[in-house]
Image (cartoon, rainbow, N blue to C red):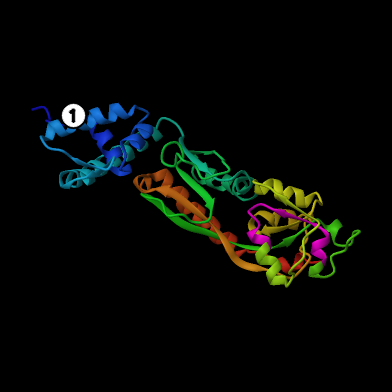
Amino acid sequence: MPRKLPSLNALRAFEAAARLSSFTQAADELCVTHGAISQQIRVLEDYFGQPLFDRIHGKVVLNSAGLVLLPVISDSLDQIETVSSKLKAGSGPEILTVNATTIFASHWLIARLRDFQQRHPEIEVHLAPTPAFPDNLGRGIDVAIRWGASNMANTRVEKLIDVDTFVACAPSLIHGANPLLKPEDLMAHNLIHDDDGQAWQIVLQELGVKGRKPAKELFYADSGLALQEAVEGGGLIVAGSLLAARDLEAGRLVIPFECFIPHRKDYHLYYPEQTASQPKVELFCAWIHEQAAIYRYNRLDYRRFMP
């Protein structure tokens, strides 16, 4: 006997709308119109002979019937996705798309990705860097590695790496026209920012420098550009240990004063709840946590980069 099942398109529309609590967001995720989602939901409600959502002040909220249906549909779609991924893997490399900032990818991730590719040749990693957090996590982006932690619905957030901060500059500034002999000497130089100025406020307070303005303040929206400005001798920066490590070891940056703020910020791993059991996501998450542990174990002693 043929199975008596509702439309798969209607079930997909219901699951997306229920998970996102929005017909509009469901339409964006499934690349259809808002009207198409509404029509598919009506098809499903007609099939069951009862409404599945309550419409309250322009929002859609699952009612008791919808709450019964959602976990069954979600689990079924997850299983179909997992099996599909396994079957597709046999026909060529499976693609894992990773989002991060460009500077994190270039200064930390890329050098380590070769290890992942050697261990898992069946998975092809695509880097998709963006300045801001991606708005398509789970829809084109499999995992994201970002500065700081944010609570997001239906998303797992796992801490990866603590970042220490300190003042850094090009070696030429130490004994230049305005030598850096004491913290107050900072004010004769340009201060480089890759945030709204908060990092320098904290550091200057730690150093006891108050009530004076620097020669100039340079603001960059991109951390990579800010760090490069410091390497080129354009001023001093409050650098993050993870991103500044290569330039310190290469001698392109030094640390003029002993002012280290441990664990000021951190990087986190983000990935959707519904894809957590996908083999490619599981393997990458396990691997990057291992790499983070190795990094923490081999953390540099930054005092040796002081003049």
Please identify the residue farthest to the left as the structure is shown: 1
Magenta span includes 186? yes
Magenta span includes 4? no
Q: Secondary structure at mark 1?
A: helix
Q: Position of residue 225 (x, y in %)?
A: 70, 46
112 displayed left or right of 136: right
206 displayed left or right of 180: left
Task: Establish if 28 lies above or below 152.
Answer: above
Residue at 8%, 28% in the rendered image: 1
Q: Position of residue 32 (x, y in %)?
A: 34, 27
Q: Position of residue 65 (x, y in %)?
A: 15, 44
Number of residue marks: 1
Task: Establish if 1 lies above or below 143.
Answer: above
Give residue 17's quadrant in the image: top left
Q: Position of residue 19 (x, y in %)?
A: 30, 43
Give residue 203's quadrant in the image: bottom right
Please identify the residue farthest to the right as the structure is shown: 177
> Observer-nearest residue: 209 or 165?
209
Residue at 80%, 62% in the rendered image: 187
251 displayed left or right of 175: left
Can residue 9 be seen? no
270 displayed left or right of 35: right
Q: Which residues are magenta?
A: 185-200
Where does label 1 land, which residue? 43
Can residue 88 be seen? yes
> Observer-nearest residue: 55 or 158?
55
Query: How many neighbours does mark 1 have within 10 angstroms: few (below 14), some (14-19), or many (20 or more)?
Result: some
Residue type of the residue flagged with mark 1: Val
